[in-house]
Amino acid sequence: MFEAFTDVVPSFFGWLNQGPLTLTIFLHTVIILPMIWIYFQEKKRLENEN
Amino acid sequence: MANNHLTSESKQLATWYFTFAAILFGAQLLFGLVAAIQYVMPGFLYEILDFSIARILHINALVVWMVFAMFGSVYWLLPDETGIETIGIKIGKLIYWVFVAAIVVVVLVYLLVQVGPADATTIWFITEGREYIEAPRWADWGIVVVALTFVANLFLTGIKGKQTGIVTVLMADMIAFAGLYLAGMFFTDNISVDQYWWWWVIHLWVEATWEVFVGAIAAYGLITMIGAHRKVVEMWLWIEVAMLFGSGILGLGHHYFWIGTPEYWWEIGALFSALEPLPLVAMFVHVLYDWGKTQGGEEARGSSASVIKNKPAFTWFVLNAFGNFLGAGIWGFFHTLPQVNLYTHGSQFTSAHGHLAFFGAYATILIGMMYIAVQGTNGIKIMKHTKASIWGVSMVTGGVVGMTVALTIAGYVQVLVSRAQMGATWAAYFDGQSGSWFTQAMDWRLILGAVTFSGFLLLAKDLLTTGKSPVHER
Amino acid sequence: MANKSVWSDNRFWQRSATWVTGFASVLLIWLTFDTSVQIAMGNDEDLKNGVTKRVPGPTVINYKITYEMDAKRGHEVPVIGEKENFFGRDDWSEEEAGALLHLGKLGSQAKNCMDCHTLLGNGAYYAPDLTKAWLDPAWGPNGAMQALTAKETKEEAMAEFLQHPDRYPTHARMMPDLGITAKEAKGLVAFLKHMSSIDTNGFPRNFGHMQGAINGK
């Protein structure tokens, strides 16, 4: 399932790109995850306003 | 204009921008027709106005009329949104004439000089030869000055006046829009580096900043045309911004599959750009949902009157919701995965996508803004369709959709014959182009291009005359 | 009254939009630094030492270039082979080759190549893709173009065609005479040869490997 590294020049992003969608799933995750933190912060704010 | 109802100078300037935009729109279609004829009759205007020149004018007029109409839209909505007259409007008006003059000179040089020797003077004064942004370097700097003035108008007004969500989004979006142009203003011998940065301008305009602009304009249109609630509209706008920029910025990777850039762009480009249609679905739902909700609220009060205050403009806005999703979303998704794009990259497929996407995502909503300006300029309370507006919108839309279908078929033939079957050489290319399926598709493209142009003539007539028509409620 | 949901709160979405946009931009800038290093042009030393660069240096014109299937990567890659004459010489210095490439790249823009052809697949679709034009069998020893232009080598045939395209029609759709001089043509051919050596991750696939026309009509 995990394929060998085939990029010409090794790099951080090339290293993350090691198999099926590893790089893009990683990037999507780091973009989306902090929204959870924003969510709870805003939830707290709305509760305090009430 | 004898009975002009505009008291705001910003709105007057907007109408100037819309007027020149409409003229350039006509020029775009005219040179598009020349190029379409050349596909069918290759000898047409050979060595007089070659395909390359017709195409430069076709796509440059496209980009510039849209930029003009976008500037116009912002000048139009600023007084409504901020509640004050646009700050520095006098300089804005002066800069408008500088912009128009520069465009006229650039076009004349394209037409009359066409190409130059292989040295820097050509790049500075004739053409930069980079698709979409061929404008010579002197004009680049002119555009930077114009854009800075525009951004200054927007920012000063936005800071002093009421800062709504729409204005906030526009401020952030327009500064990125202007700033990105700088990425396309240098020369390098390395074509991979050249195209890397060239896509920063092209992609981050049309698949990021312009789309966000459309979101903001759609929000403004819903508030002014059907009285949608600002809170709802602006919440959607923020969701759209998150999704558009979230997918569009790294979606840039789908242009980095084959230009010499590393393999990791396959994954980044594929997955982020695969998500690009999502916000377009959101925009579609948002426009239609708000319409239904507002109309439903009206009916619940026992009234059967339409909530739409500007029928032709709203028609174009709804077409935008459809067209953006279909042209940019579906047609873009068709060939955005590298497994597919390996064969479709640089084929008539791209052209099919380009036609429906630019029309669906941008032309529609900007024409809608022109109708809003006609309504405001003539003090019309409820603007209705005329015969010309209905025929105009039907023929232009039908023509572009038809051209897209024809080009898609041509694209299939090209991809299967020239690419998959024969391996993309010179001979393979012409074999694909000579097949009857391809040539028939190009015949249809020309016919439907002529329909589009005729529709444009009706549209132009309507925009010029409908303001005085007695059908509207004043 | 129940608490208002965060999901229908404008501030939540505004902050999310700001975060997503900002972070995606930061990632793009980071990726740009990474990619810029990888697509920087190589030099003569790399070529002499057999160091593979995604974009080789201009002196690649001194070498034979082929396009071969790489089993590990699963697609074709340009392979730089032994020395090969280019306009009668295989010892173009870094300065000379660089100047030629510079002239060719300028020429490709000054003549609006991209508004009929595609380069690396980008441009217009009215004429063939030029990404690997240098490797097109039509220009090779068994192809039609050397005989048609009465030239002995690929580069001379290409240069002759570029100067007088209207004399050598290959299709009803003809390339116009763009006033390309002999010097500019040389530069443009160098530019094309250099472009064919760029590692385009296997685009276009199967280039020039199909022998004998299969009629597409």
Image (tube, coloured by chain):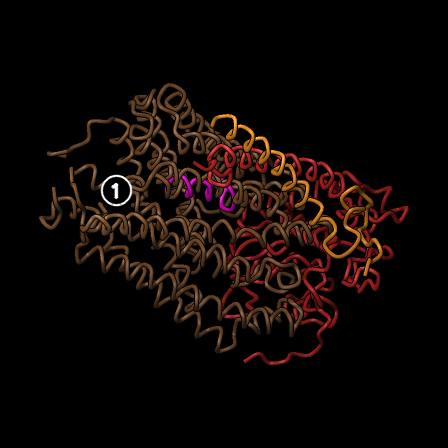
Chain colours: A orange, B brown, C red
Residue B308, percent from left and from top: 24, 48
Residue lying furthest right:
C49
User: Could you tell me which secondary element the residue under label 1 belongs to?
Assistant: helix
Q: Residue at x 42, y 32 (%)?
A: B165
Residue B146, percent from left and from top: 41, 29
Question: Is B213 inside the magenta-drawn segment?
Answer: yes
Mark 1, Cα crowd under 10 Å, few <14 / some 14-19 / many 20+, is: many
Quadrant in the picture for residue A43 = top right
Residue C118, percent from left and from top: 58, 56
- Image: B304 above or below B166: below
In the picture, the quarter occupied by the N terminus of chain B is top left
Magenta stretch bounds: B205-217
Magenta stretch, overall SS: helix
Quadrant in the picture for residue B183 = top right
- Image: B38 above or below B293: below
Q: Is residue A45 left or right of residue B342?
A: left
Q: Residue at x 48, y 54 (%)?
A: B328
Residue under circle 1? B372
